Image (cartoon, rainbow, N blue to C red):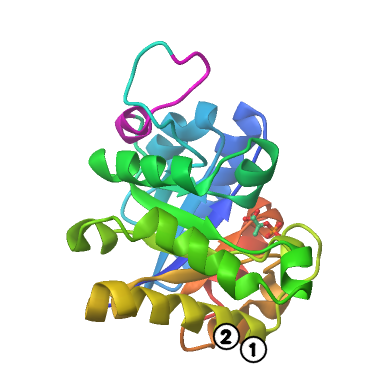
Amino acid sequence: MRKKIVAGNWKMNTTYQEGIDLALEINKLVIEKANKDVIVVVSPPFTHISEVNKVVDNDRVFVAGQNCATETSGAYTGEISAEMLWSAGADFVILGHSERRSYYGETNELLKIKVKKALEFNLTPIYCVGEVLAEREANNHFDVIKEQTEKVLFDLSKDDFEKVVIAYEPVWAIGTGKTASPEQAQEIHKFIRDLLVSKFGEAAKNTSILYGGSCKPSNAKELFANADVDGGLIGGAALNANDFLAIINAF
Ligand code: PEP
């Protein structure tokens, strides 16, 4: 069955104590008020992961890393491995976020390795795809998303593919307050699903495809109402526990 997922990407925000306090607040609201059908994920900075995992109810709130290394271990100063994330309590890892692609030069080739590494250490990758504004304006967005999807995921075994979550995040909508319309989101989500079905068959009908890009309490309902939108990857609004809860309950 296709899972509904709402994942909060905290990015490089919150000091250690602020992060733990936010996790506690989210956890309390989720336990008391959240729709139990929705898988809730929080993605704090690396330094907070272990403690966040300890303070939340591990049946209701799951923890994600925001990135992982291509290598397993060794002389890679500053890197965090998939195994380290897993050993600190993470169940998910966000990979291919547009900020990683644009500021840190992460390519589809590199992300293909990271997705496999995450799967090797039992992390569920939340693999992000999405076009920049110029690509949409040039009507290239389908090609860009096709390439990001095929180059990174098409080499996976069917078993591994079934563990992957995808996030469609139009880059022009991230942190800009500009959201894709429900029709634009559905069009791309269906395009991605059809592409995945062409490669992996029926299994792709169970893949969760999340929308990300200025998703907030006021627009989550109309986005999540679409047939191929299975939840959201949330940036700014995930830093406010009440807004995050409202998005979780928008299904
Ligand atoms: C994100 O960075 O993944 C994101 C969707 O950010 P925002 O919700 O702030 O646009």
Name the amino acid type tagged 1: Glu
- Residue located 67% across and 72% down the image: 140
Vertical arrangement, residue 122 with respect to residue 213, above or below:
above
Please indicate whether residue 84 sits to the left or right of residue 94 in the image. left
Q: Quadrant of ligand 1?
A: bottom right
Q: Which residue is mark 2?
A: 187
For residue 183, the mark is: 1
Q: Which is nearer the eye, 28 or 126?
A: 126
* Cβ–Cβ under 8 Å for marks 1 and 2: yes
Mark 2 is surrounded, within 10 Å at the Cα level, by few (under 14), some (14 to 19) or many (20 or more) other residues, namely: some
Whether label 2 lies within 8 Å of ligand 1 gets the answer no
The magenta region covers 76-87
Residue 29 at least partly seen = no
Q: Is residue 69 magenta?
A: no
- Residue located 46% across and 37% down the image: 52
Q: Which is nearer the eye, 46 or 20?
A: 46
Please indicate whether residue 48 sits to the left or right of residue 17 in the image. left
Vertical arrangement, residue 38 with respect to residue 51, above or below:
below
Q: Position of residue 197 (x, y in %)?
A: 32, 79
Q: Which is nearer the eye, 189 or 26?
A: 189
- Residue located 62% across and 38% down the image: 105
Quadrant of image for the N terminus:
bottom left
Q: Quadrant of residue 54?
A: top left
Vertical arrangement, residue 19 with respect to residue 75, above or below:
below
Vertical arrangement, residue 236 with respect to residue 213, above or below:
above
Name the amino acid type tagged 2: Glu
- Residue located 46% across and 34% down the image: 49
Q: Secondary structure at mark 2?
A: helix
Residue 102 at least partly seen = yes
